[in-house]
Structures are given as C-alpha cells and as structure tokens.
Image (cartoon, grey):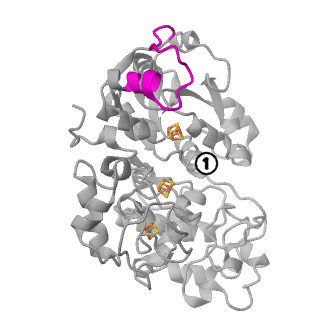
C-alpha cells in the first residue's frame, strides 16, 4: 500500500494488481472511470492493471493462467445475462481477493432486469421478429455467434460473493476514484500552499462561517475555478487539503465542535466533503466508513487517516470522523433528497402526476411538488442529486433505500407523508402508467418480492 503519491520509489515497489471485467451492459461505468481525466493521476501510478479487455487487449486465457488470489481488486461491471458472464465472474472471484460490483447493472441488474418480466422466447421474438425498428427482414432468430442466455438476469452477488458495491448508472467519476483510493489505502495529499479562503471574495465580509454555517475553504487548497461560496454554496473540499490553513480555521473549528446540532444543509455539505476531501465513499453497501473507522479504532484512538498534513486539518477531520463513528446511520439513511438543494414545502403542490416531457419545471422547487415522479426520497444518496441539478427527476439508479417491499406503495406513502401532495394514494398510483418501469427501473432483478414473469 502506498502512503503518499509523491513518494515515487514507494509507488513502483507497491503497485497493486487490479482487473476489470465487462459483463452484459453498456460499458458506461468504465467510461465514467475514464471521464475522471486528471482525477486518474493519483490512482494510475498505484495500479498494475492485469486485465481490462474493453480497453487493453488482454486475453481471457491470460486471466485464467494467473494464480488464484494473485490480483488484489477485481471490478465487475454488468448484469449476469449469459453463461459467459457467469463463468467469467466466477473466474474473477477465484483470481481476485476483493470483488467490487461496479455500477448498478452489477449491483442490482439495472434496466436490463426489466426483461425478467418476459420469457427468453418472447424477448427473442420481440427483438428479431416484431420490433418496429427491425433492420433485418430475414424473419429468423439468429443462432450463430450468439451467447447462451440464462433464464433470468441477476445481479452479481447472486452468482459470486461481492465485497463492496459502487452503485450508479454510471457511478460518478469522483466516487469511483475515491473508492479506489480508499481501497488502496491511499490518503489525500496536500495540493497548493494556500487555502481557498485566501482567494475567496467573501473573506472580508459575508463569509459563510460568520453565519455559523459549515464551509471548508479554510482547509481546502486553492486552484478551483468553481468558487462555490461566491455562488452562495459552501466549499466542500473538492480540491483536497491545503498545505497551510487560513486564519478562518478557528471559526471552522468552533462549528465542528458541535456537529450534532448542524443544519440539514450543513449535513449535505459534510456528506460531500467526506467523499471529496477524505476519499470516504458513502454509498449504500459500500461500508468503507465502517472499515476506516475500524482501522482507526484498532489503533486505540480516534485520529484522522491523513498523513503529513497540518495538525489543524487533522484536528478538524478527526472531529468529522468521530461524528461519523457516533452516527453509524449517517450514510445509510441518506437518500437523494438529503443531497438535493431544492426547496420542499413552499408554493407548489402536486395535484396530478405529470410525465417528464410535460411542461418545464422551475429550478428552485422540489420536482414532486411540481407534479413529477422524482425517486429521490426512496433512492440511495451518492450521486449528489446529479439529475435534479440539470432539471430532470431522479429515476433511482443508485438503488432503493429499502428492499423487498412493494416499491409503488412505498413511494406513494413516503411522498404523501413528507411533501405537498393533494391527490390520494389511489389517484397517484393510477396516474402512473408503468409501475415496474417507474418504481423498479434499476432494481427489479434484485427485488425478491417480485413475482411477475415467474
Ligand atoms: S450501470 Fe449503467 S452505465 Fe454502468 S454499464 Fe450498466 S447501464 Fe451502463
Ligand atoms: S423529491 Fe427530488 S426534487 Fe424533491 S427534494 Fe427530493 S430529490 Fe430533490
Ligand atoms: S438523481 Fe437519481 S437517477 Fe440521477 S444519478 Fe442520482 S440516483 Fe441516479
């Protein structure tokens, strides 16, 4: 394990072997990893990629020839649809010490899982003989060079043991990177000398900390172009630690002394900070927060996992980690709404269900209260409300916050309790055309309660 990216000798000696497998899917998760661009720089020198057929020309036989357990981490993308998917995943399990279900196809079966409502024969007939956009008029179902299909699509953990899950369709690049950094035991390293506060135009007056709200500019490196505080949002540390903290550190310390009384807005910022600054990916199923705390606890004291950082930064981050340890459900109970900046309970009220293409929602109010089906309240946090930020309702790709229950009923009960909705549960559900495609779009293959198509 490497300690610091700047220690080049250490990097060469301690590169860890990783493998990537693509199963039945669209390759978007790998694309998201590549989209990290410069974010890959701290990661790549630490990796020895021994199998990545969709990017590098490694042969399947090369993976078979490796010793069992020789590879440290294996990332498996995609749902299990074909016999080949299943064989290759079992091979990965033998060769890798840790297996990560990479993306919602692998975690939950994803949109492909909707195919479980139909028989294989019906699916083939539809695809090759009936579909309106058919391109091949030979009126035959191909039987050459076609993989053998399993009867049902299942998520990866139905086939092999999975050690951690990175959900999302695709997962955000930052989350993939922070997960990999965490697994490698790599800690954040200081970037520029000066802290963000020193170039923030709110420094002298109107500072967010002066309003007793969290902003991490005092310990975060300069260098970003977003300048969130100037746009009314707290700095959440995406540039990583500064080498020197700013004079505002005392105010940040004062606020973080009592994290139990911070507002829900500050909790959202803390949530983002933990991933972006400390590389703690807080995703359901990926219990890295628990792991990191265990490591710390084993040393007999709560301290930060950071190395070579100013003690002032360690002091702040220690408190955050202590808070995380004391609030074990902090990440488990978080849903997309917890990270969404839209206002709930203001002017608008849902009086009928609108399809996504009806009208143009405003950017300030909750989409549910404007009439749209937004799965935010029942979907695991992690994406930072990515779709809602571009004015599209959440469709649930990070997976449900509760499993094996009737998801239509649960959604309706949840929004009737907590949002401005003036139609009855029966009206609401009758106005949604496709319950499975709306409420279980990404997770049908994982929900044991499902009976359709059996
Ligand atoms: S999770 Fe989404 S992006 Fe990733 S492979 Fe599956 S469909 Fe593609
Ligand atoms: S329901 Fe959607 S728009 Fe409303 S607060 Fe939740 S995530 Fe945001
Ligand atoms: S808002 Fe919902 S659908 Fe969009 S990325 Fe987040 S979890 Fe996925």
Q: Nearer the viewer, residue 295 or 99?
A: 99
Q: Is residue 141 left or right of residue 243?
A: left
Magenta stretch? 123-145
Residue 222 point in image, percent of width and height: 76, 67
Q: Which residue is mark 1?
A: 173
- Decide: is 317 above or below 3: below
Residue for point 78% across, 64% down: 223
The picture places residue 331, in percent across and down from the top left corner, at 40, 60
Please identify the quarter of the rendering in which residue 241 is found: bottom right
Asked if ligand 1 lies within 8 A of label 1, the reply is: no
Which quarter of the figure is the C terminus placed in? top left
Chief secondary structure of the magenta portion = loop
**Could you tell me which residue is drawn at 71 percent across and 58 percent down?**
190
Q: Position of residue 68 (x, y in %)?
A: 46, 16
Q: Residue drawn 40% across and 45% down?
A: 442
User: What kind of element bears circle 1?
Assistant: helix
* Residue 141 counted in the magenta span: yes
Q: Quadrant of residue 105?
A: top left
Q: Tell me what residue is drawn at x 33 percent, y 20 percent.
A: 121
In the image shown, does 305 or 199 lie closer to the viewer?
A: 199
Q: Is residue 384 visible?
A: no
């Amino acid at each position: 394990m490497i300690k610091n990216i700047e220690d080049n000798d250490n990097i060469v000696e301690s590169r860890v072997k990783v493998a990537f497998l693509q199963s039945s899917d669209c390759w978007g998760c790998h694309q998201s990893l590549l989209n990290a661009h410069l974010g890959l720089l701290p990661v790549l020198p630490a990796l020895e990629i021994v199998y990545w057929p969709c990017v590098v020309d490694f042969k399947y036989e090369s993976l078979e020839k490796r010793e069992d357990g020789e590879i440290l981490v294996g990332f498996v993308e995609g749902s299990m649809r074909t016999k080949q998917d299943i064989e290759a995943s079992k091979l990965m399990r033998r060769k890798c010490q840790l297996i990560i279900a990479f993306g919602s196809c692998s975690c939950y079966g994803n949109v492909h899982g909707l195919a479980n409502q139909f028989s294989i024969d019906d699916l083939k007939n539809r695809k090759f003989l009936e579909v309106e956009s058919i391109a091949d008029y030979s009126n035959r179902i191909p039987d050459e060079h076609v993989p053998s299909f399993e009867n049902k699509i299942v998520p990866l953990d139905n086939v092999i043991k999975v050690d951690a899950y990175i959900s999302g369709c695709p997962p955000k690049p930052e989350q993939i990177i922070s997960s990999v950094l965490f697994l490698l035991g790599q800690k954040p390293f200081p970037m520029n000398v000066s802290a963000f506060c020193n170039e923030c135009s709110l420094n002298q007056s109107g500072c967010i900390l002066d309003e007793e709200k969290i902003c991490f500019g005092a310990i975060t490196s300069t260098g970003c172009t977003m300048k969130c505080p100037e746009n009314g949002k707290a700095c959440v540390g995406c540039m990583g630690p500064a080498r020197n903290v700013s004079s505002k550190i005392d105010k940040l310390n004062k606020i973080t002394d009592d994290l139990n009384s911070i507002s829900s807005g500050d909790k959202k910022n803390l949530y983002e900070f933990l991933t972006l600054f400390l590389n703690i990916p807080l995703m359901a199923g990926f219990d890295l927060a628990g792991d990191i705390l265990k490591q710390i606890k084993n040393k007999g004291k709560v301290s930060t996992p950071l190395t070579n950082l100013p003690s002032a930064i360690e002091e702040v981050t220690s408190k955050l980690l202590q808070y995380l340890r004391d609030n074990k459900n902090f990440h488990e109970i978080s849903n997309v709404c917890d990270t969404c900046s839209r206002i709930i309970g203001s002017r608008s009220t849902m009086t009928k269900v609108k399809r996504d293409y009806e009208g143009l929602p405003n950017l300030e109010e909750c989409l549910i209260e404007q009439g749209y089906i937004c799965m935010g309240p029942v979907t695991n946090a992690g994406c930072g409300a990515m779709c809602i930020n571009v004015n599209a309702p959440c469709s649930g790709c990070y997976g449900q916050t509760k499993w094996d229950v009737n998801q239509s009923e649960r959604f309706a009960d949840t929004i009737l309790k907590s949002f401005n909705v003036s139609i009855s549960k029966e009206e609401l559900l009758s106005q949604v055309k496709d319950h499975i495609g709306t409420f279980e779009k990404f997770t049908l293959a994982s929900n044991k309660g499902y009976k359709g198509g059996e």
